[in-house]
Amino acid sequence: MATMNDVKDNSADLELGAAFLAQSREFLAQEYLPKIQKCLESLSDRDLWWRPNEESNSIGNLLLHLSGNARQWIVSGLGGSIDRRERQTEFDQRAPVSREDLLSRLRETLHEVDAVLAEFNSSRLLDHYRIQECDVTALAAIYHVVEHFSMHTGQIILLTKLLANKDLGFYDFSTGSPAYTWNEPE
C-alpha cells in the first residue's frame, strides 16, 4: 500500500520531470534557435558553406546535422515517427542550400521536437528507447539533444564571428546587468 510519503515523492518526481521537459523546450526554441537565426542574418549563403579545411564542417552542414540529430533522437526516437536519417549526408553536402531553406528545415524540426516534448509524459523519462543503436532513457535522449544543440550553436556563433567580423550583440550591458537580446522581436 502506498504511503503519503510515496505519493509526495511521486508528485515531486513528476514535477521535476515536467520542469526538465519545459526547460529543454525553452533552451531549444527560445535560446538556441534565436541565436542561430541572428547568426544567419549576418551571413551570406556563400558564408554558410565556407569551411576552413576539409576536416571541418560549414555552418550549412551543422544546420543539416542539427535537424537530423534532433529529428532522429526526439521526433523518431521518442515520438515514434519513422527514422529516415542518413547521417553522413549531413556532412557530405557541398552544394549550397539557401539560408531560407536551412532555417525552414531547422524551424520545422524544432516545431516537431517541441510537439513531442509538449506531449511527453514526464513519468516516462526513465523508460528505455533504442536510438542510433544505443539503449538510452528518454531523459538521456532529451539531454543529448539539448547538449548537442548547445555545442553546435556555439560553433555556429564562433564561425559567424570569424566570418562577419563583428559582435553579435546577444547581451545588452547598458544597465550594468546583462540583458538577453537574442530573442527580442525586431
Image (cartoon, rainbow, N blue to C red):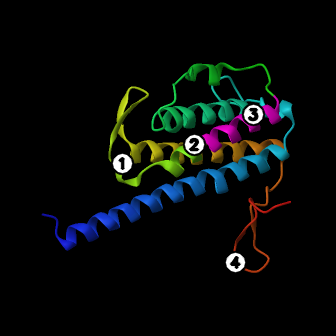
Q: Position of residue 20 (x, y in %)?
A: 46, 58
Classify residue 58 by image quadrant. top right
Cα distance, mark 4 to mark 2?
33 Å
Indicate the amino acid at tag 1.
Arg
Q: Nearer the viewer, residue 153 or 113?
A: 113
| Residues at discs 4 and 2 in contact (Cβ within 8 Å) | no
Where disc 2 sits, the SS reads helix
Residue 71's tag is: none
Q: Quadrant of the C terminus?
A: bottom right
Cα distance, mark 2 to mark 3?
16 Å
Range of residues picked out in magenta: 98-113
Instruction: Please give the residue where the numbered disc 4 appears in the rendered image.
Output: 177
| Residues at discs 2 and 1 in contact (Cβ within 8 Å) | no
Instruction: Say few, some or many: other residues with alpha carbon within 10 Å of mark 4 (under 14 / 14 to 19 / 20 or more).
Output: few
Q: Position of residue 64 (x, y in %)?
A: 66, 30
Indicate the amino acid at tag 4.
Ser
Indicate the amino acid at tag 3.
Leu
Q: What residue appears at the point 78 percent right and 32 percent down from the top-left corner? A: 101
| Residues at discs 2 and 3 in contact (Cβ within 8 Å) | no
Seen in the picture, residue 54 relative to 138 is either above or below; the reply is above
Instruction: Please give the residue where the numbered disc 3 appears in the rendered image.
Output: 102
Q: Position of residue 69 (x, y in %)?
A: 55, 34
Q: Position of residue 113 (x, y in %)?
A: 57, 42
Indicate the amino acid at tag 2.
Val
Instruction: Say few, some or many: other residues with alpha carbon within 10 Å of mark 3 (under 14 / 14 to 19 / 20 or more).
Output: many
Side of 186 relative to 143 (left or right): right
Whether residue 100 appears in magenta in the rendering, the answer is yes
* Residue 161 visible here: no
Residue 113's tag is: 2
